[in-house]
Amino acid sequence: MIDREILLEKMKTSPYKPMRAKILQIDPLTDKEKFFRIELEDKINLGHEPGQFVMVSLFGYGEAPISICSSPTDKGFFDLTVRNVGTLTNAMHKLNKGDIVGIRGPFGKGFPVDNMFGYDLVIVGGGLGIVPLRSLIRYVMQNRNDFGNVQILLGCRTPKEVLFKEEAKEWMKRAEIKLNCTVDKADAEWQGNVGLITTLIPGVDINPARTYAIVVGPPIMYKFVIAKLLEKNIPDHQIVVSLERRMKCGLGKCGHCQIEGKYVCQLGPVFTYADLKDFKGECHESRTF
Ligand SMILES: Cc1cc2nc3c(=O)[nH]c(=O)nc-3n(C[C@H](O)[C@H](O)[C@H](O)COP(=O)(O)OP(=O)(O)OC[C@H]3O[C@@H](n4cnc5c(N)ncnc54)[C@H](O)[C@@H]3O)c2cc1C
Ligand code: FES
């Protein structure tokens, strides 16, 4: 059986039972975020789609949804980036290499990668939004000929909060990806743009009919970013957004994540703007990255 089938078999036995997974590597990225490279204990691959998430658990501390930030083409491990905000994430920040965590998933609907083949991509990340986007970017790098021009726009509050700085240099060099980063407040060393992420969009050369825009960030950010992308005439179904809701089961059972009766853990977290328009605004109030 291939890894994906073994994984589905395991999840079918009990989708609520976490699989044991070992931490291979931990790197501090900023004051608040740590990077974790992890392998499932029986060394099978997650077989996820870029944009999907796993439920991560630690005994005594609980469970939380965390986006997978490696590409499905990265074999033998998967990556997570965790911001220390509460009970579980604080406990995760105290873990060491070799420690064991519980993993359920992968869950949710990822970015519609198959539909994007042959299109130009405008990838827009605000703050921790770059985390699920890293999965897509690594996938695109490893399948570069399947996509047209790729432009990444990143926004952060301060230069200290910019994630994957060194890796981003590789994205630009190795995969001919254009990257532009802006911060709300610069420091003495910052040489990039200063201002909100929306200020980067007018300067992007977009052929709307052949462009997919992928947006991940806080609701206030994607609301204004979508407005700018619509001004560029990108069709609603080619604007893709990832939502974050409070989740418990990840399986469409508990109802914690629902917006107007739709379960974000199953139908999303990735939606097109065409889907989002039906949500009448509640998603703009959801707590996100
Ligand atoms: C699809 C998805 C993907 C995600 N990906 C990532 C990721 O890649 N990296 C990452 O760091 N985070 C990610 N998150 C967010 C992460 O799941 C949450 O931050 C999670 O709550 C952290 O768990 P915790 O136990 O550490 O924090 P908690 O103890 O749950 O606390 C987190 C914050 O929420 C507040 N809070 C707690 N309970 C409630 C409540 N009932 N209502 C409102 N506020 C409450 C707390 O006061 C605190 O400020 C993702 C979430 C989703 C849904
Ligand atoms: S998290 Fe339980 S239904 Fe979505």
Image: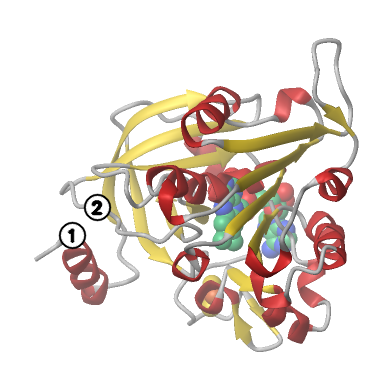
Residue, far left: 1
Q: Quadrant of residue 38?
A: top left
Cα separation between marks 1 and 2: 6 Å
Label 1 close to label 2 by CB (< 8 Å): yes
Q: Is residue 116 left or right of residue 23?
A: right
- Sort mark 2 into few (<14), some (14-19) or many (20+) by Cα contacts within 10 Å: many
- Sort mark 1 into few (<14), some (14-19) or many (20+) by Cα contacts within 10 Å: few
Residue 3: give its label: 1
In primary-sequence order, the first of circles 1 and 2 is 1
SS type, badge 2: loop
Residue 248 percent location from the top left of the image: 53, 68
In the rendered image, which residue does mark 2 sit on? 45
Q: Is residue 216 left or right of residue 96?
A: right
Residue, far top: 188
Residue in the picture at 84% in, 29% down: 193
Residue in the picture at 44% in, 42% down: 141
SS type, badge 1: helix
When the figure is inspected, residue 288 is found, relative to residue 170, above or below; the finding is below
Residue 183 percent location from the top left of the image: 82, 32
Q: Which amino acid type is shown beneath numbered disc 1?
A: Asp
Instruction: Confirm if mark 2 falls within 8 A of ligand 1.
Output: no
Residue in the picture at 66% in, 43% down: 152
Q: Does residue 86 appear anywhere in the picture?
A: no
Instruction: Confirm if mark 1 falls within 8 A of ligand 1.
Output: no
Q: Which amino acid type is shown beneath numbered disc 2?
A: Asn
